[in-house]
Image: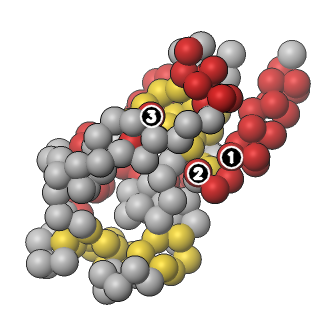
Amino acid sequence: MKRILISACMLGQKVRFDGGHHLINHPILKRWQEEGRLVPICPEISGGLATPRPPAETQCKFPILITTKEGLDVTPQFLRGAEKTLEVAQREGVVCALMKAKSPSCGNNQIYDGNFTNTLTDGAGVAAAELLRNGIPVFNEKQLPELFAFIEDSERITA
């Protein structure tokens, strides 16, 4: 049975920066959860940040710098969260991840540009990038059909 890492907010856990969640109510995800296939994590909480917390955005990718709108450097917490996310993924043997789009931790192909103006730029959040660097595909909530196809294909190959 293939296991999938998932952003905890997508399972209804109130771990988002604003104290909310981003529950995805989909029958396949519900079934996977009932089967024990989903491995929830919030990289930002795992890295030591509280809920609620000020929004943060990536200011610079090389070297990485993530700050709040007020300029507080939260890079260490984001990096620690990324490391812990990879540790959990490897320990649990996940084949891929479903993570929150646009997040400075979890975004897989776009994140906010660091100006706090809701402007997106190409790139991955630090936890998603760590997973990708280590060969773990990352999908977001707008890519559910691709995720479902990936899991179906991987199960057919190993069946």
Q: CA distance from mark 1 to mark 3?
A: 14 Å
Report the disc number at residue 141: 2
Left or right: where 30 falls relative to 49: right
Q: Secondary structure at mark 3?
A: helix
Q: Name the amino acid type tagged 2.
A: Glu
The mark nearer the N terminus, 2 or 3, is: 3
Q: Are marks 2 and 1 in contact (CB under 8 Å)?
A: yes
Q: Name the amino acid type tagged 3.
A: Leu
Left or right: where 155 falls relative to 97: right
Q: Quadrant of the C terminus?
A: top right
Query: Which residue is more in the foreground, 134 or 39?
Result: 39
Q: Are marks 2 and 3 in contact (CB under 8 Å)?
A: no
Q: Quickly name the residue at label 3.
A: 11
Q: CA distance from mark 2 to mark 1?
A: 6 Å
Q: Quickly name the residue at label 1.
A: 144
Q: Name the amino acid type tagged 1.
A: Leu
